[in-house]
Structures are given as structure tokens and as C-alpha cells.
Image (cartoon, rainbow, N blue to C red):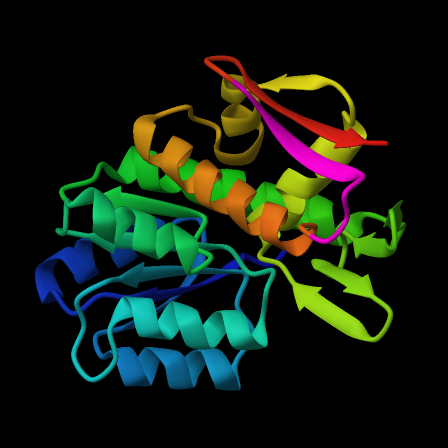
Amino acid sequence: MSKKKILYVEDDETLGFLTADSLESQYDVAHYTNGQEGFNAFCNDEFDLCVLDVMLPDMDGFEIATQIRKRNQEIPIIFLSAKTMKEDRIKGLKLGADDYLVKPYSMEELTLKIEVFLNRSQKTSSKTNSTYLIGSFEFDPTNYCVSKGKEITNLTEREAALLKLFLDNKNTVLKREKILMELWGTDDYFMGRSLDVFISRLRKIFKEEPNIRIENIPRVGFKLLID
């Protein structure tokens, strides 16, 4: 069985060498030290997951992720950064990243995260292309989009997973901790802030449908109400 291929972009030579060397025991790692070169590699090759430093020469990690999401809504993206401000983590997650690890990180944690997202991505790609009808909208969880007539709204993989979780549990209270564990495998503060951002976006998509509401249950969680 061939190894999963990872795009790894990190300009710190020592850290990049150590991380790539560690990951290469399990994965096929393409390591680049320049943001533009890393993005060019993504455009010209097939990868299963991206690991991106944020501060890079020529094109930073946030911009790489933005451009990647324009081409591929499915591939998992993990940011690595020395930036510890919560605003930076939230920005990265809003761009469609699956996780944001602050340096210094442990190789064990990074490897575990990679395995979680690779396994989730594989399960998602193997599912049948069933759709959900939500009022006048149609939700395609496989292709990460919500459509209404000819108008199509693309979602990130995490947003699509959140909407599917709500639909599979419609009119039922979902505890905040359960949602976080299902989507991120953790219920820490920063993931919670990202969840709030995703819910706000879903609310905007369905704002003109009075029979579709995501209700906040204080100190408990959320409930998708479909009348």
C-alpha cells in the first residue's frame, strides 16, 4: 500500500528537516521552504494533506491555504505557527484549516492529528453521494455545497461536517462538547471559537428560510430546528 503524500512547507531549516525526517517513516513528504514553491507544488501534484507554516517567504501560509481552498475544499490543512494570538488561530481556522498547532509542538501530537484527518478524509471520500433537502435548499455533503436553484454556496469540509451532524440530529439538542469532539477531536477554547464562526456562517446561508433555525441553548449547545 502506497504512503499518503503530504505537502509540508516550513522555512526553518532545522525544524523542517527534523519534522520531515520524522514524518517520512510513515508518509511520502514533499518539503518546501518557500511559500510560492510549496503552492506551485500543490498545483502540479496530488497530495492527501497539507502541513503549512504561517510565516513563509514569498507567500505566507494563510495565503497558500486561501488559494488551496479555491481549488480543493476537501484536502485537510494543518497550520504550524509561532503566532500564539487567538486571533491568528481563529483566522487560520476561518480560512478552512482543520487545525492550528502552536510551536513548539510535539511530533506525537502532529502525527496523531495527521492520522485523524487522513482517516476522516478517507471515510468522507468513500461515502455515497446522498443529498439532504432543507426547505428550498439541497445540501450535498460529499461535494461540500448547499444549493438553491442555480445558486451554489461552497462549504469547507468542516462546515459540511457540522451541517451534516446537525441534520442527522435535527430538532435535537447537540451538546457543544459533542460537536467539538466529533469535528475536531478536542473541546478546547479555540476550537469552540471556530465552531461559533461556522455556526454564524450556516445561519447566514439559511437566513431567508424562516423554518430553518440554529438555536443556541445557553451553556449547553445548539439545536437545528426545521419546521
Point out the stretch of residues depicted in magenta. 208-217
Whether residue 214 appears in magenta in the rendering, the answer is yes
Q: Residue furthest top?
A: 219
State which quarter of the image contains the C terminus. Answer: top right
Give x and y (percent) for residue 17: 18, 61
In the rendered image, residue 180, in percent from the top left (x then y), is placed at 50, 28
Q: In which image quadrant can residue 13 be found? A: bottom left
Is 39 situated left or right of 54 in this image? right
Where residue 194 appears, as percent x and y from the top left, is 41, 41
**In which quarter of the view is residue 4 placed?**
bottom right
Figure check: 30 above or below 22:
below
- Image quarter in which the N terminus is found: bottom right
Residue drawn at x 49%, y 41% is: 115
Residue 15 visible from this viewpoint: yes
| Residue 4 higher or lower than 196, as above or below | below
Residue displayed at 72% across by 61% down: 145
Question: Residue 179 or 213: which is nearer the viewer?
Answer: 213
| Residue 24 in view | no
Residue at position x 70%, y 50% in the image: 206
